[in-house]
Amino acid sequence: MNEFRLPFIIEYPDKDDFIIAKCYETKQECYKLTIPTGKQLEKAIHIKFRASDTPLSLSLGIELQEGSSAVIIEDWSGDIKVPEINFVNHITCQANSNLTYVVLNGNSHQTKMTEKRVSNIASDAKCHIFTYHFGNKKLTSRLIQKTSGKGAEINTDIIAKVTDDRDLSFDCTHEFAEKQGSGEIVMKGIAQGSAMLNFDGLVNIKKTGGGSAGYLKQETLNLSPDTTVRAVPALKIDTNDVKAGHSAAIRNLNEEDLYYFGTRGIEKETAKKLLITGFLEKELKKIKKHKTAYEEVRKLI
C-alpha cells in the first residue's frame, strides 16, 4: 500500500484484495480505490471517514475492473464535526462487474454538505447505490447513474430522515444511453419539525437506449404540520420500445394514527418510531444480507 495518510480508515481483512492510490490530476484532494479484474470480494470494504473540525473538500473514485464484485460502505457516521463538506464520488463498473455501494451519513447536525455522485456502468455490469442520510444541517445531493454498455443494470435507493430546521435536497437521474438497460430509483423520506425535504427524480432514456426499462418511486412520511416537503418525478423518453413509469406519494401523520397506538398503550414517540421502521422495512430488507451496513442503518434510525 502506498505510504500516505488517508482521510479515512479502511476496514477489511486483506488489503491486498484492492488498490488504493492518491490522485494528483485535480486541485481537490483525490483518492481512487480499484478492485482488480476478476476479484470477487466476499466481505464488505468499510470506509470510515476520520473525525475532523476543519472544512473538507475531497474526491473518491471507485473502479471495478472487468468481472469483479464488491460491497463498499462509505461511512460518515462518526464524530465528524466539520462545518462544511464538499464531496465528489466517481464510480466506474467495467463489463460484467457487480457493485453494491452503501452510503451512511449520520454526521453532525451542524454540518453543511454538498455531494455529487456519478457512475458509469458498462455492458452486463450492475451497480446498486444505497444512500442513507440522517445527518447534516443542510445537504445538497446530486446523483447520476449512466448505462454505458448494453444490458447494464443501475439501481438507486435514497433514504432520508430530516428533523428540526434542517434542509435536505436530493436530485437523482438514471440515464439509459445503451440498449436493454434496466433499473429503478427509490426515494423515501421522513420529515418532522420545521424541516425541509426535496426530492427531484428523472428517468432519461436516450435515443440509443432502446429496450431499456426504468422506474422512479418517491414516497414521504410527514410527521409534522410544519414541514416543507416537495417531490417531483419526471420521465424523458427519446425512443420507442421502452418501459418507463413513475409515482410520488406523501403521507401525513394524523391524530387517528396516534390514537390507534394510544389505545394499545404505546406512547406518541414510540409510535412514531414504529411507523418509521414500518415505512422503511421493505428498503431495509434489501441490505439485510450485508450485515455491517444493515446494523449501522438500524442504529441511525
Image (spheres, rainbow, N blue to C red):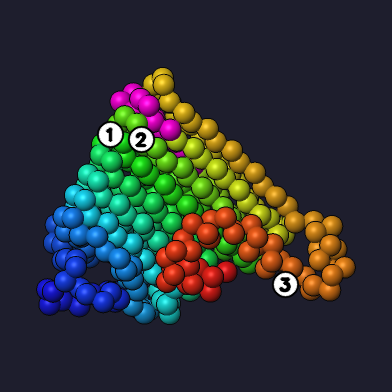
Q: Is residue 60 left or right of residue 218?
A: left
Residue picked out by circle 1:
150
89 and 38: which is toward the camera: 38
- First in sequence: mark 3 vs mark 1: 1
Q: Is residue 191 visible?
A: no
Residue 136: mark: none
Q: Residue furthest top?
A: 240
Give the quarter of the figure containing the C terminus: bottom right
Estimate how packed mark 2 is, as few (under 14), some (14 to 19) or many (20 or more) residues with alpha carbons within 10 Å: many
State the image quarter where residue 69 is shown: bottom left
State the image quarter where residue 213 is shown: top left
CA gap, disc 3 and disc 1: 48 Å
- First in sequence: mark 2 vs mark 1: 1
Residue 210 located within the stretch drawn in magenta: yes
55 and 286: which is toward the camera: 286
Q: What's drawn in magenta, residue-wise?
A: 201-213
- First in sequence: mark 2 vs mark 3: 2
Q: Is residue 16 visible?
A: yes
Residue 203 pos. (x, y %) = 44, 36
Residue picked out by circle 2:
181
Q: Secondary structure at mark 3?
A: helix
Residue picked out by circle 3:
270
Q: Is residue 276 above or below residue 267?
A: above
Residue type at tag 3: Thr
Q: Which residue appears at 84% of the width and 57% of the height? A: 256
> CB under 8 Å between callouts 2 and 1?
yes
Residue 134 located within the stretch drawn in magenta: no
Q: Is residue 203 above or below residue 17?
A: above
Residue 247 pos. (x, y %) = 59, 38
Residue 37 pos. (x, y %) = 16, 55
Q: Which residue appears at 37% of the width and 26% of the height? A: 211
Estimate how packed mark 3 is, as few (under 14), some (14 to 19) or many (20 or more) residues with alpha carbons within 10 Å: few
